[in-house]
Amino acid sequence: MGSTPSFPRVSIPRDNISVVTGGNAGIGYETAKWLAMMVGTVIIACRSEERANQAIEQMNKEFEEEKQKKTEGVVDYDKLNVEFMPLDCNSLKSVMSFVESFKSSGRKLHKLFCNAGIGIQETLKYTDDGHEQIFQYHYNLYIPVQGHLYTHGYDDDDLDVVQASNGGFDIDYIQGNSDMQFQRIDYNHTLGIL
């Protein structure tokens, strides 16, 4: 990696819409910031509007710093084109509300960065829908998002999807090669969500 960019910095058309789940912190924050600094429109999809707005404010400060440094590929606009849409990964109802809100906006989604997630937990936790939390956040959550957007007139060439995850479903844990003991979980009932 070193001191040179590790990805190509090319301009993205302003009407190119990207959704970054969990875009208010961590890798999602950096992804959203750099997409926006290369012109595209970015929607931060997360639970907290307050934290999203704080992230957007910080992104704009860092954007000014990058403009001052004349960083290659960074646009020369007054502010980044970043907005918030509510999405609570603990609730498939919230996920479907997000999908319907986006579809009703009439805009076309070009990139979906499925980044929101949680780490390994000491105890088994369930979402509002009764699904194991790590499974819903990292896998089950994006099935309805992708499925409903693809059925909304998208072709495979229209929507790029990047899915991040963590070690929560590490094969060593699943096979029991760890001190952490997982309870047997029936995932078959989660497949009917589409």
Image: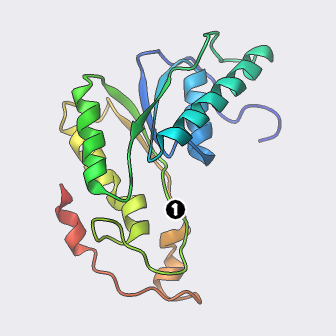
**Split into 4 quadrants, where in the image is the N terminus?**
top right
What percent of the width, then of the height, locates residue 113? 46, 42
In the displayed structure image, the side of residue 167 where residue 114 appears, left or right: left
**Split into 4 quadrants, where in the image is the C terminus?**
bottom left
Residue 104 appears in the figure: yes
What percent of the width, then of the height, locates residue 95? 30, 49
In the displayed structure image, the side of residue 97 where residue 177 appears, left or right: right
Q: Which residue is mark 1?
A: 118
Residue at 83 percent of width and 34 percent of height:
3
In this view, the residue in front, 135 or 124, is 124
In this view, the residue in front, 144 or 79, is 79
Disc 1 residue crowd, few under 14, some 14–19, many 20+, Cα 10 Å: some
In this view, the residue in front, 108 or 61, is 61
Q: Which image quadrant is residue 192 in?
A: bottom left
Residue 155 appears in the figure: no
- Furthest toward the front, the residue is 50
Q: How many marks?
A: 1
Residue at 29 percent of width and 53 percent of height:
143
Relative to 51, say whether 68 is above or below.
above
The coloring applied to the image is: rainbow
Relative to 49, say whether 171 is above or below.
below
Relative to 163, say whether 119 is above or below.
below
- Secondary element at image label 1: loop
Q: Amino acid at mark 1?
A: Ile
Residue at 39 percent of width and 55 percent of height:
89
Residue at 58 percent of width and 87 percent of height:
178
Q: Which image quadrant is residue 136 in?
A: bottom left
What percent of the width, then of the height, locates residue 119? 55, 66
Q: Which image quadrant is residue 75 in?
A: top right
